[in-house]
Amino acid sequence: MVRLEELEDEHFINKPDSTSDGALLVDDDEDYTDTDSEISSDAGSEPDLDESLLDRLSALRDIVPPKTRAKISSVTSTLYNATSTTVNYSGKGLWVLATSILLLGIPYALALGDEQQFIEEEKQRQMMAEGAQGLIQSGEPGQEQAKPAL
């Protein structure tokens, strides 16, 4: 079971003297404290120049209204996510392209080079066969030599 107990503040227990109309007569200096703010202590000195750009930008946060800050945050987040997604997918696409070239393109290029070499060898064999046949035909007696056409 919960038991409630009222705690009284000492300011309400020890009430200062007042006049007949309820105005306070005693000025309590304990209620006023020096906050040691930068404005009161540095009134005559120069400002601190060791501020970074990040400090200055974070100080601007209070100047920009909350709705505008929310919009800026939303736009920045959207741009960051879009850029991140684009870079991620383009990297994956480049990886697929590079591996496809390695796995398919290089063997195709090697096969094409072998085919070209085979075709060249066939042409050389055919030329050698024609040349040998020409020597055999020119060496036969009884046949007339072919005359070149003009």
Image (cartoon, rainbow, N blue to C red):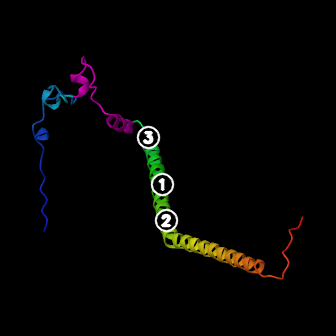
Residue at the front extreme, as displayed? 141
**Residue 98: mark:** 2
For the point 88% across and 67% down, which residue is it? 149
**Whole-number angstrom distance, CA of label 2 to CA of label 1:** 22 Å
**Whole-number angstrom distance, CA of label 3 to CA of label 2:** 49 Å
Tell me the kind of residue under disc 2: Ala
Please name whichever residue, 72 or 110, is drawn nearer the observer in this view of the structure. 110
Query: What residue did someone put label 1 on?
Result: 83
Query: What residue did someone put label 3 on?
Result: 65
Residue at the right extreme, as displayed? 150
Please name whichever residue, 83 or 132, is drawn nearer the observer in this view of the structure. 132
Judging from the image, what secondary structure is the residue with disc 1 in?
helix
Q: Is residue 118 above or below residue 93?
A: below
For the point 65% across and 73% down, which residue is it? 124
Name the quadrant containing residue 5: bottom left
Q: Is 18 left, or right, of 106 in this rendering?
A: left
For the point 15% across and 25% down, which residue is it? 27
Q: Are marks 2 and 1 in contact (CB under 8 Å)?
A: no
Position of the C terminus, as image quadrant, is bottom right
Residue 31 visible: yes
Name the quadrant containing residue 117: bottom right
Read off the magenta span: 37-62
For the point 75% across and 79% down, which residue is it? 139
First in sequence, mark 2 or 1: give its number: 1
Q: Is 40 left, or right, of 94 in this rendering?
A: left
First in sequence, mark 3 or 2: give its number: 3
First in sequence, mark 3 or 1: give its number: 3
Tell me the kind of residue under disc 3: Pro
**Whole-number angstrom distance, CA of label 3 to CA of label 1:** 27 Å
Position of the N terminus, as image quadrant, is bottom left
Residue 128 x/y as whole percent = 67, 76
